Amino acid sequence: MSTAKESAKQGGVGQFLRDTRGEWDKTTFPSSDDVKNTTIIVIISVIFVTIYLYLVDLGWVFLLDGLTSGVNWLLGA
C-alpha cells in the first residue's frame, strides 16, 4: 500500500485520486439499523453512568456533611 506522498511522487495528482477512489470503494459503512442500535446503547449507557455518578456524589455529600457535623460537635463550634 502506498502512502499519499509516494503516490504524489510516482504519478502525480491523478494517481493519488485514483488510489483514493480505490480505497474509498473498499470502505464499508454501517447500516441504518446498526446506527440506531448503537445510538440506543450509547444513550442508555450515558443514563446509567449519570445515575451512578449522581449517587456517588450524593454519598460523598452525605459523608462529608456527617464528618463536618461531627467535627463541629467535637470542637463545640
Image (cartoon, rainbow, N blue to C red):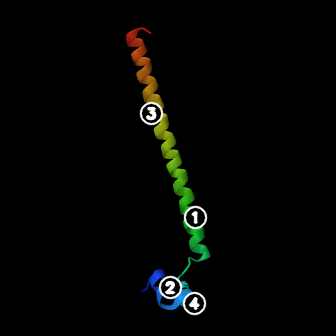
Q: Position of residue 76 (x, y in %)?
A: 42, 8
| Mark 4 element type | helix
Q: Residue 25, how many percent across, how many down?
A: 55, 87
How far is disc 4 from disc 3 in space, using C-alphas? 62 Å
Q: Residue at x 51, y 56 (%)?
A: 45
Q: Name the one closer to the observer, 55 or 12.
A: 12
| Dot 2 amino acid type | Ala
* Circles 2 and 3: CB atoms closer than 8 Å: no
Percent across and percent down for residue 1 are 42, 86
Residue at label 1? 39
Q: Earlier in the sequence, mark 1 or mark 2?
A: 2
Q: Where is residue 51? Give x, y as percent.
A: 52, 45
Q: Secondary structure at mark 3?
A: helix
Disc 1 from disc 2: Cα separation: 39 Å
**Secondary structure of residue under mark 2:** helix
Residue at 47 percent of width and 90 percent of height:
10
Q: CA distance from mark 2 to mark 3?
A: 59 Å
Give 67 or 9, whichever is nearer the viewer: 9
The label nearer to you, 2 versus 3, is 2
